[in-house]
Image: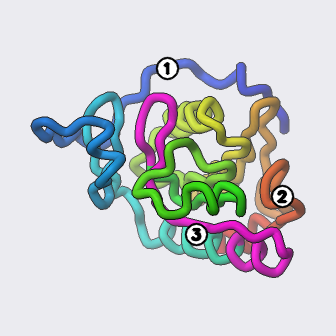
Amino acid sequence: MVATTSELPKIDETPAIAPIVRDNLTIENFMANPPDNMEWVDRQVVEKNDMTLKTGRIQSKLSRCWGNYKDSSGQGGEVYTEAPCRTNQQIRRPDVAYLTPELAAQFGDVPTLPQSFPLLAEIVSPTDIAENVFLKAQEYLASSCQEVWIVLPDSHLVFVVNYNQILGFRAGETVRTQQILADFSIAVDELLA
């Protein structure tokens, strides 16, 4: 299944969790000292706390797989979970993210990556609105990201989104990176088990 990114829905993103208002907190202050489990969305601090046991297990598994693969393939770089990055509009914490060796050398010690990670994954939790997750993917792609994995555990689907297309993978199929972390693949059933 293939679709272009222009076919994604264009709706306003509404946070699933109520914003937390903090006086005198600017995006620059947030980037310099990002609070744990928080994102900067629409000029407000929003708590990100929707991880379940199932989504946490998938997050951990994908992080290990990407990390093991970047080491065994010799591609290097770094893999992160819920590390803050700045998009053109917000500060987000993707569930899993990969940083190339070049970008890791350039930005590896900053509190918040000043751009999107080149490869990242969002694992859809029961409180997420799927359309908002696809809008978030567009936001990442507009901010230096080259590939976003959207994992839907209950539907047994993984979508790989880049500038030109959306590829869908289901149970019984193998999902592959398209542009970053060359030649990585994992069976959907293995990832979601």
Magenta highlight on residue 78: yes
User: Residue 11, labelled with which disc?
Assistant: 1
In the image, 46: left or right of 166?
left
Crowding at mark 1 (Cα within 10 Å: few <14, some 14-19, many 20+): few
Pointer 3 residue: 58
Task: State the residue lying farthest toward the right.
Answer: 183
Residue at image x 74%, y 46%? 160
Instruction: Tell which of 103 and 176 is nearer to you.
Output: 103
Residue 80: name its quadrant: bottom right
Q: CA distance from mark 3 to mark 1?
A: 28 Å
Is disc 3 placed on a helix, strand or loop? helix
Q: Amino acid at mark 2?
A: Arg
CB within 8 Å, label 2 to label 3: no
In the image, is residue 108 above or below residue 140?
Answer: below
Q: Earlier in the sequence, mark 3 or mark 1?
A: 1
Pointer 2 residue: 176
